Every structure is written in C-alpha cells, then in structure tokens.
Amino acid sequence: MESQKINISIVKEFFSTIKKSCKLIQKCSCFFVFVNLCIACIQGIIPGITIIVFQRIINSLQQNIDTVEHIIFLILFYVGLNIINELISTLYSFYNEKFNLEFSQYVNMLMLEKSAKLELKDYENSETYNIINRAQSQNGTSILTFITGTIEIFKQIISVITISIILVRFCWWMLPLIFGISIVRSMVTVYTDREWYKLRVSRTNDERTNRYINYLLLTGIAFKEILLYGLSNYFFMKYKNISDKIKNQDKEMQKKIAIYDILFDIGSWVSMGGLFGYVMYLGVTGRLLIGDITAYIECIENIKSGSNEIFDNIGNMLEQSMYIGFIFEFLEISEFKGNEEFDIGEIYKIEIKDLSFKYNTTYVLKNINMTLNKGDSIALVGENGSGKSTLIKLIMGFYREYEGTIKINDIDIKKINKTGYYQKIGCVFQDYTKFEDSIRNNIRFGNIKTDNTKSIENMLEITHMKERVDEIGGLDTIVGKWFGKEDLSIGEWQRISICRAAFKQANLYILDEPDASLDIFRQEELIETYKNTFKSAIRIFITHKVNYAKEMGEKIYVLEKGEILESGSHTKLLNDKGKYYEMFNACQRM
C-alpha cells in the first residue's frame, strides 16, 4: 500500500514537472515543444513504413511478380525514406543544440535573479543552502533533456504501435510476451531510481561538507591556519570518511541494479530466442516468404528494443523529474509581496518604537525605542551578541517580521519601496565584501550608475588610500587573489569599503565596526573622515571600542542582551556610572 502511494506520488510529480518545464520553455520559445512533437510523429512512423517497403522488395524478388521498374521505385522509396529520416535527425539536432544555448543562459539568469529576490533570513537558514546546492546540480540543459526525453518516449510509442500493427496481423500473442518483460523491468527501474533519489537527497549535507573541505584546501583561503594548527590530516580524514560512506552506498545500489539487469537480460533473450525460432520454423516449412521472415524478425527486435527504450526512458524521466524538481524548488521559494507603495526622496527622520525581534524563538532585540533626525549622530556600543548589528539590519529593512514599528519620514518602513530606500543608505558592514575586481569598481559599486574618476579619487584621498592605489597601478588595477596580481591588506580593504559607502552620497550612513582592522593612526583618520564627510546625514556608528564612541556619536546607546540599557551623552553616561562607565574604564586600562 505504501509502495503504491509512493508510485502515485512519483507519477504526479512527473506530470507536474512536465507542466512546469513546458511553461518555462515556452517563456523562451513558443515553438520548441511543438516542433519536437511534430518531428517525433514523423520519425515514429518512418520505421514501420520502411519495414513494409523492405518486406515488399524481398518478396517481389523471391516471387518475381513485380516489374523491374516497380522494384526500382520501391528501392528508391526505401532509400529516400532513410535519407529524409537522417536529414530530419541532423536538422533536429542542430535546432535543439542552438536552442539549448539560449535556454541554458535563460535558466542561469533566472536562478541568479531569484537569488537577488531572496531575503536575508533565507540566507541565514541552512536549508536554503541545501536547496541552492541541489538546484545548482541541475540547469537549463537538464530541463531540455527531460522534455526531449519525454517526447522521445512519445516517438517510441508511435513507432512501437506502428510496428505492432504489422506484427499483430501475423501473430498477436507475441506482443504480451515481448511487452511483459519490459513492463516488469520498468517497474523495478522506477523502484531503484526512487531509492537513488532518496539516498542522494539524504546525503546533501555530507556532499556540501566535502565541497566545503575542498574549498578550504584548494583555494588557500585557510592555508595559514591549517598549516599552523596541523589540521591537514583532520580534514583529509573527514573528507575520506564522508567519501567512503558515499562510495559504499553507491556500490551497494550498483550491486542491486547489476543483479536485476542480469536476471532481466537472461529472461529477455530466452523469450526472444523462442520467438525468433518460431518465425524461422515457419520459414523453413514454407509458410512464410523470406521478406516476411526478415520483416517479422525486425518487428520483434524493434518492438523489444522499442518497448525497452520506452519503459527505460519512462523510468529515467520519472527519476529525472525528481532532480529537475530541485530547480523549481529553488525558483518557488516564497518571495515577499508586500504593499511597498511609497518612494522617498531622502531620509530625514527615523523613528523606532517598541521594536522587538527574534531568531526562531529567541528574542535578540527587546523594546527598542529611538528617534533620529537629519544630522544626528549616534553610537551603538555593547558586547558581542548584544544586538547592535541586528538593529541596523532592521533599520535597513533587511528583516520584515518583527514586533513594534520602524518609521522613515513618518512612513512605516514596510510600505516604503526598498529599491529607492537602499539608494539613500551607505553602509560599511562588519563582514564587508572584498570584490575581486578593479579598485575603480570596488568603489563605484556604491553607486554603480556613476563613474566619476574625480569623485573616486577624492574618496581615496579622504581615506588616505590614493598613494597606495597609485603604487599598485591605479584605479583599474584588479585586486584580490582570484583574478588580480595585487592584493590589499585587511585594513586597506576596509578603507576601500568606507570609500564605497561614502561614494553613495547617502542620507543615512551606517558604519558597523569600521575600525576593526585599522591601526591607531588610521582610526584617528577615520574619526576625521566620519565627522567631515558624513556630517549632513544621519549617522549610526557601531563599535565595541567604547573610548571612540564619544568621538563618533553625540548620543550613545548601550545595548545589553538586546535591550537599551542606558543612553545619553558621553559625560552623562560616565556620571551615571553604569555599564558604559565600566566599559570605558576597562578600555582605558588596556
């Protein structure tokens, strides 16, 4: 009963995947499926016709009942059919390959566009990465192979039906024997394919782990620590253990399949041998002409191979539909469709009221209240995990599910068009991105529509990076370890990220631990840059270096365990002798 439910589920999934795949293909070309179906019909009929024509040629020669002209006509007709079939196959292959290039690019772009539509919470969920990992194992070619394979089944069915009509006029009882073995074989194939599918899905995490170990060892990203801490053998053994587990699972499955194949091959050839012997017996006893013998033997062979192909392809396509489903599983990840109707020209006020936020069931922010106006500068301080970075992600609209309200210019942030909103924000993230590109692009990514060399150089001057950039070849020098000949230090990369944020000409600047990788001199330069460059905007500075907070924020908020513990000016907080006082004195002693 359970097995029957699984089979019904597989069939439903198969037809669902056909429907989704055809819709996707149709968006790229209205004619692809129709052209393939037409060609399948033509190529499905031709084999039956050629068998009949060849039968007629041989029988005519044996009985000497047709004129030479008629026999020559039959020969030319037979050759012509085969030429047409080959010509159609060649053009069909060219058409499909050409469309495959277009469609593969279309699907790749679709997946990239989908990745940009996901929310931050999606990328903080490990299951999302499992879905992406499975989707990346498929592509546009996989979808086309699945659809053309399904159409190939349709072609084979037409061909087998056509040829069966010829054979049934001779001996109908042969058909159940030929089809019987193929049907049982296909049922076993569907079962083993399902087992393969469940096995591969269950080990997605293991395969991701091995890819990660590959990434660590082959890119050199962790080379220093792996060498220093002697971790090579640990990762080698972890990789080997997972690989051995996967290898042994594959061997076990392949062993089962090999046993099934041997049993079915023996049964198939024993039955086919009996049918061939029966036809030859009728020929020897004079009840069949030579043309009839060749025709019926070819019919038996074609029906056998055709039915095997049909059921094998059905099994393969049922299996493939499960893997193609990975692409649609990714493309169908739910997207936010809210009422973001308001566009804002600038950000001049931020009001947060009774804001609380939780990851899963744990609150990381509780009852946050603050108001910021144009020109205000605040500093958020607190220990690691106090909720500082989460708060700025909420202010930037990265999370939509929270309690309380966040208003921008007295408008609920949930109702504001995020594309326009992001254009008004410049941010240096704690985990800033090192774009493996030119210095110029690394900065202009802050405002990709602008390519003002003078402004870019001005940003480099402000952050004291101009001399270093000139030293390595100028703005168009590719930096990074992937494509560039030059690389920057961590502090230099951080200053480039500050340039990128400043290049945006925003109304709200958020700097999350921007001094983390800067030496004492660069930290002093950052303070001056922050005060002079961003002074007309709303500024939020996050740091755990409390001794700098007074320089970066007119008002300081101290966060602890997701709550605002205290707030006020540097002097007020020192006088209150609370958490800030303790943290400041601790910094002074260091």
Image (cartoon, helix red, strand yellow):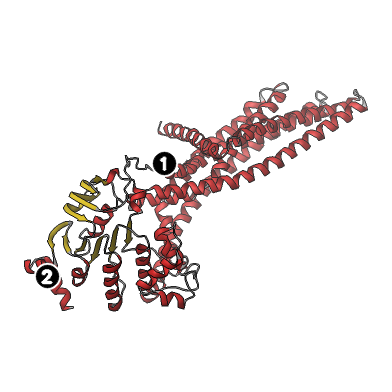
For the image shown, how many numbered marks are present on the structure?
Answer: 2
Q: Secondary structure at mark 2?
A: helix
Pointer 2: residues within 10 angstroms few (<14), some, or many (20+)?
few
Q: Is residue 516 above or below residue 152?
A: below
Does 167 sit left or right of 69 as displayed?
A: left
Q: CA distance from mark 2 to mark 1?
A: 50 Å
Q: Secondary structure at mark 1?
A: loop
Q: Position of residue 483 (x, y in %)?
A: 50, 67
Q: Residue furthest top?
A: 169
Q: Earlier in the sequence, mark 2 or mark 1?
A: 1
Q: Quadrant of the N terminus?
A: top left
Q: Position of residue 159 (x, y in %)?
A: 67, 30
Q: Residue furthest left?
A: 576
Q: Quadrant of residue 60?
A: top right
Q: Are marks 2 and 1 in contact (CB under 8 Å)?
A: no
Q: Label 2 belongs to which residue?
A: 582
Q: Quadrant of the C terminus?
A: bottom left
Disc 2 marks a residue whose amino acid type is Glu
Q: Quadrant of residue 34?
A: top right
Nearest the camera: 180 or 571?
A: 571
Pointer 1: residues within 10 angstroms few (<14), some, or many (20+)?
few
Q: Which residue corresponds to the image point at 71% horizontal and 25% vertical from the top-left?
A: 167
Nearest the camera: 62 or 269?
A: 62
Does 326 sit left or right of 401 as displayed?
A: right
Q: Is residue 312 visible?
A: no
Q: Position of residue 309 (x, y in %)?
A: 62, 37
Q: Position of residue 510 (x, y in %)?
A: 28, 61
Q: Label 1 belongs to which residue?
A: 332
Q: Which residue corresponds to the image point at 33% horizontal and 54% vertical from the top-left?
A: 424
Q: Which residue corresponds to the image point at 49% horizontal and 71% vertical from the top-left?
A: 477
Q: For the residues carrying marks 2 and 1, which lies nearer the camera in this image? A: 2
Disc 1 marks a residue whose amino acid type is Glu
